[in-house]
Amino acid sequence: MSMLALEHVTLKFGGITAVNDVTMSVKQGEVFALVGPNGAGKSTIFNLISRFYTPYSGDIRFEGHSLLKLAPSDIPSLGIARTFQNIELFERSTVLENLLVGRHRHVQSTFWSDLAFTPFVHREERRHREAVEKVIDFLDLQAYRDKYVAGLPYGVRKVVEMARALATEPKLLLLDEPASGLSMDETNDLAFWIEDIKKQMGITVLMVEHDMKLVAAVSDRVLALADGKVLAMGTPKEVQSHPDVIRAYIGGSPEAAA
């Protein structure tokens, strides 16, 4: 069964068609990657799913229900979390505090109960703290728990952003270029984490990525885009060897790329 489906989705900005009649589906429990040259429409699809953009035509469905009538603020409550190409963290807050922000969708207390700090609020805070500590342990962030984000290396910040998304306990995790700017060792760690996110946490992953080695290592299926159009879909090996994909990436014929 498809968890997420785009049905003939088109998005236009003036005279430019950023996404052109894209149909795709992400199955529950898989890692699905979107690949393609810069400007192919990959991150635009993420912004459509997140409801930052509304398609010109077509539909986007999550667990069988259309997302088009929802606001961006409604999306996390469905169990969809995402990271961004440009890291979006609270730099003057600690790693722990950033992850606790990710628990917002699970908050059940009211303003007045918070003010009185009732036993229910105390139990809630302990529950959220335990959930966040599990994510910190999962991603080996113990050494950075109480450090301010502003002082952290870039690679650690990328992990913290993924950790905050995981702290929401999503059903579907959108990773927008998670390996961008990472070293080879950090990318290898990322590959293990993505596998564990899928297998141990049971989270479905939709990923935009340029690192084809990472894509090949972790993806069950891949959709290649160029100029907003679908070029190919299949296993990583099938997509990487597809003639249209080869032409989009390097130009010329498939034989020239061999």
Image: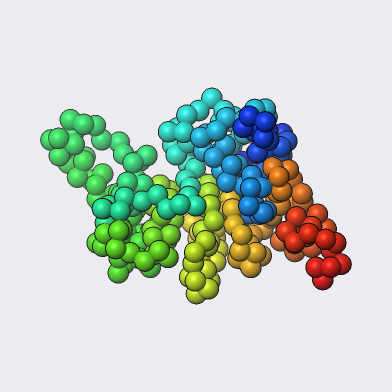
Residue 121: x and y, percent? Answer: 21, 41
Q: Nearer the viewer, residue 65 or 173?
A: 173
Left or right: 71 in relation to 206: left
Q: Is residue 206 visible?
A: yes
Quadrant of the image containing the C terminus: bottom right
**Quarter of the image where the N terminus is located:** top right
How is the rendered protein coloured?
rainbow
Which is more toward the observer, 47 or 101? 47
Residue 76 drawn above or below residue 126: above
Residue at position x 68%, y 35% in the image: 17
* Residue furthest front as drawn: 15
Q: Residue 253: give x, y in percent of width and height.
A: 85, 61
x and y, in percent, of residue 16 in the image:
67, 35
**Lateral position of residue 169 relative to residue 3, left or right:** left
Asked if residue 203 can be seen in this view, the reply is no
Which residue appears at 63% of the width and 47% of the height? Answer: 39
Furthest residue to the bottom?
185
Q: Is residue 189 above or below residue 8?
A: below
